[in-house]
Image (cartoon, grey):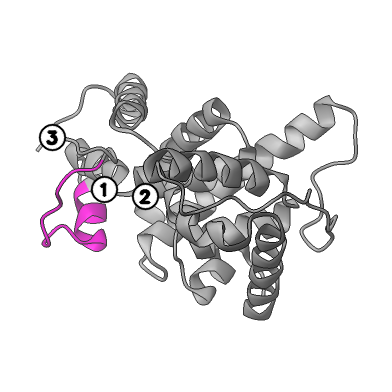
Amino acid sequence: MTNNAGTYPLPLADDDQSIVRRIVAGDRSAFELLMRRHNRRLYRLARGTLHNDAEAEDALQEAYMSAYRSIGKFRGDSALFTWLSRLVLNECFGRLRREARRQNVIPMVDLSTHQDAVDAMTAHDSDSPDHAVARAEMRALLERKLDALPDAFRVVFVLRSIEEMSVEETAQCLDIPEATVRSRHFRAKSLLRESLAREIDLAERDLFEFGGSQCDRVVTSVLLRIADEYGPGDSQ
């Protein structure tokens, strides 16, 4: 059964390497386990990059297909989530570049340059009587403000603050120096705090919820595509 986050309870024995070995051996149930284990975090990464729920789901599906096709190349030099994150980011950045070309504008913003501007706003009272509603409103507001950040800052913020990846893991995902990760993360936090003040700390862990129905939709779609491309296969 799925829980509200769209994940399954996972046995401790199913570590990354054993899951990869099972997938390489043709066990598609292991690939489903991989998707359910990482769905929510990878979706939030895609959503934070693309600004659009439907586009994020599509990008996540394409990244999973790439993962399935190339899983035999995974050697464990980095964490499986880091490897999957790179696939998701590559898909997202490719979509951004294609969209820029369609719009006949300058291609995707260079990750070394930024527009340092975020709209100011009045701080929200975090002690509202209806705390649950206020928290939901704050989360939605923070998502909009995060969408407004320059690409380089936004992606680093998603990896570091929302997904809680280390500086080293983030640097590996983006292929940038660790010092650059630190500086961009600090700047992203500063910009958001200017807009949201103390409320950001209450809302940042709940961004871009990925509910059970969305999780099931992505898993089902990817498994059907794998079956179409590779045949029915065996589930173990």
Distance between the alpha carbons at the discs numbered 1 and 2? 7 Å
Residue occupying the point 71% across, 68% down: 187
The label on residue 51 is none
The label on residue 1 is 3
In the image, taking residue 73 as reference, residue 145 lies left or right, namely right
Q: Is residue 3 magenta?
A: no
- The mark nearer the N terminus, 1 or 2, is 1
Residue occupying the point 81% across, 55% down: 110
The label on residue 71 is 2
- Res. 74 in view: no
Q: From this viewpoint, which residue is outermost toward the bottom?
A: 179
Label 3 packing within 10 angstroms: few (<14), some (14-19), many (20+) = few
Tell me, yes or no, whether the two marked residues, 1 and 2, touch with CB atoms within 8 Å: yes
> The C terminus appears in which quarter of the rendering?
top left
Magenta span? 7-22
Distance between the alpha carbons at the discs numbered 3 and 2? 26 Å
Q: Which residue is mark 1?
A: 24
In the image, taking residue 91 as reference, residue 204 lies left or right, namely left
Looking at the rendered structure, the secondary structure element under dot 2 is helix
> The N terminus appears in which quarter of the rendering?
top left
